Structure formats: C-alpha cells, structure tokens
Image: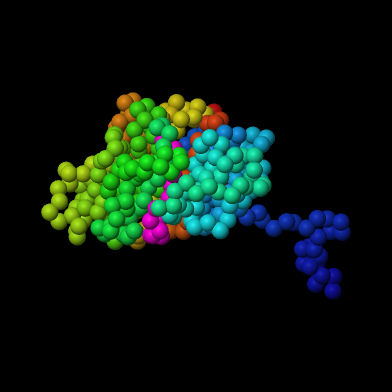
Amino acid sequence: MIRRLLPLLLVLPLAGARPTPPPAAPDNLAKIKLPAGFRIGYYAQNVAGARSLALGPDGTVYVGTRGSKVYALPDRNHDGKADELVTIASGLNEPNGVAVRGGALYVAEISRVLRYDNIAAKLKTPPKPVVVYDQLPDKEHHGWKYINFGPDGKLYIPVGAPCNVCLPEEPIFATINRMNPDGTGLETVAYGVRNSVGFDWSPIDKALWFTDNGRDMLGDDKPADELNRAANAGLHFGFPYVFQGDLLDPQFGKGKATSTYTPPARKLGPHVAALGMKFYTGKMFPAAYRNQIFIPEHGSWNRSSKIGYRISLVRVDASGKQATSYETFASGWLQGQSSWGRPVALLVLPDGSLLVSDDQNDCVYRISYSE
C-alpha cells in the first residue's frame, strides 16, 4: 500500500507550500528585433484600434481610430507610460485623423473635420465639437483620413481613391489637399495619390514627403508602395495611370508616358501598406538617425507570402532631397505567416523617444534608446 502511495505523495505539495504557478504567457514584445541600444515597451494598452497619433502642448497624446472613438493618453508624471485611457469622443465615422493646433484637437472623419477647443483642460468633459469642414466625399473606400498641420500653418488632408484603381468621378479623389485652420481656402497640393495615410515635412527644406499605397491585384511583387517627395505644389504622382514611377497600369496606362508623372523618391516593398511616416527630429537616438525617415508598414494582404508588419528606415542625404537607402528598423510583429501586431503611425515625443500605434494589438508602444 505504501509503495502504491509513494508516486502520489511525490507530486502532492507539502503542507503550507505554495503551488508552482503556471508558466507565464510569452511576452510578444520580446519578439521585436531592434538595433543595439534600442528598447520597446508599452506606452498604453487596451487602446482599441489605435491609429493616428498627435501631441498636445501639455504632453497629452491623442489617438484616432477607424472605429468610432478618439482617445487621450495623458502622462502627467512623465514616466514614459500613459496614466490612463480617456475617451474624448465616440459615435464618430472612422475618426482616423487627429492633429493639434492652438490647444484645439482636430479630428478627421470620412467626410468632415471637427475641432475640440481647449481640449487639454476638458479631457473628462469634452466640449461639443465645432464643424470645421463637412464637404469631403463620403465614400468609405480609402475614405479614412490622416491629417497634420504643415509649416505654412495649414491643415493638410488627403482624399483617397474610392476604388482599387479607377478614373475617379470627382477631381478631389486621389489627392492631398490643404485648408486654413478655420476650414476656408481648400486647395489641392498633390494629384495622382492613390491612398496616402501618412506624411511629414523635411526638417531640412520643409518639402512635403508622403507614403502612398500601390494598387492591388497585379501579383505578389508589383507594384511597389511609394515614398514620395513633393518639392512644390501641383505635381502629379501617377494614379491611376502609372505606379512606382515606371509601371503603366494595364488598363488606364495605355497611351501614357511614365515620364509625364513624378516618380517616387523611393520604392518600398510591394503591398507592405506603408502608413504614418515621420522624420526623426529628436535627440535621444544616435546622430545617424536624425532627420531620417521612419515608416510603419501595416502589412500586406494582397500577397501569397506576407511582408511588412514592421518599421522601416529610409535614409536621406545631407541635402534632404535624396532617399539613399531602405532598410528594416524594427521587426517581429510577423511570425511566419501569422501577425500579432500591425504598426500604423508614429510620433516623436519631446524626450526623443518614438511612439508607435498598433491597431491589431490595440496599443501604443514607446521605443527608446540608451547606450
């Protein structure tokens, strides 16, 4: 009898002993590969559908979504993590775009732009929004907006093509536009832009740079997504006639010359879904990264083998006009052919760290550097 009980006694915990806890769930952040000295952590979690990011003058980070809500992430003790998640607005129509000017939060829905005045003082009791502009198209296909204020003080806002590839019915489709902060003076600054969900201005010469997603259904390896530089207003970047600067569309490109259109500053990966690019203007990262371009690649769907799901780095020369290389900066959100996260947008914080939103993992990360 004793011999029979011995195996059972060996696996039972002794009286007063604590049971062995189950193994911890694997930490996905440990899968992220970064250059030496860089670290990644969570700035905020449970931020459902986190997309565009904007910084308020008091340090509050605002987050747009492609759902119906807009969030605020205050970090009052400046410890590199949000103190709480505050819902600023709900019931909106894909409020992807957020920007801050003069203490007011601007929010772009599909067909209109709203403004929440003195927002930092009213996080818990947001004011009724002012409608800045409500004459944008209501098409949902590529209808979500990225917005930001340029060096000229104007609000820049793209209008994506309402299709995979087509001749849009209205001239405002497939463009990047700008308006005065009060919604007046709308004008187009770039044409032939299929779907830009990210842009920024060079800290060297103030030129507008933007990402653009190439069309689908031409195979795994074409066309490339694009990083474009608009040296001046009025340039045409090819849609729907030309993609990646040198590829005529099989339907709409007939009889067209690629030389008619402005080529990209850099071809990116095919179908990587390049989104909210930013020039790195902080001082925390090593000098080699300053004034260089970081691009979150949301990840491919129109491809038999997935790519993207990473943050890329495009280096530019000292003049700020030439993109000289394209490389991976952060990877690991794609494991094999399964993703656990999809980077969307970036924001450089005053301390020089870099925030990254993720609408699959519902969070905002913070990337920092120390030697």
Looking at the image, residue 131 sits to the left or right of residue 323; the answer is right
Q: Residue at x 32, y 53 (%)?
A: 173
Is residue 344 in view?
no
Residue extending farthest to the left is 255
Q: Where is residue 65 shown, x and y percent of the image?
A: 51, 53
Quarter of the image holding residue 104?
top right
Of residue 291 and residue 178, the one placed in the foreground of this image is 178
| Residue 308 x, y percent position in the rendering | 40, 50
Residue 141 belongs to the span the image colors magenta: yes
Most common SS among magenta residues: loop
Residue at (60, 42) in percent of width and height:
119
Viewer-side residue, 243 vs 1: 243
Q: Residue furthest bottom?
A: 1
Residue 24 visible in image: yes
Residue 77 appears left or right of 221 = right
Pinpoint residue 329: horizontal percent, then vertical percent: 43, 40
The answer to whether residue 24 is left or right of residue 271 is right
- For the record, the magenta segment spans 136-150
Q: Residue at x 40, y 32 (%)?
A: 152
Q: Is residue 227 magenta?
A: no
Q: Is residue 279 above or below residue 188?
A: above
**At 84% across and 59% down in the image, what residue appears?**
14
- Quadrant location of residue 263? top left
Q: Quadrant of the C terminus?
A: top right
How many numbered callouts?
0
- x and y, in percent, of residue 108 in the image: 47, 49
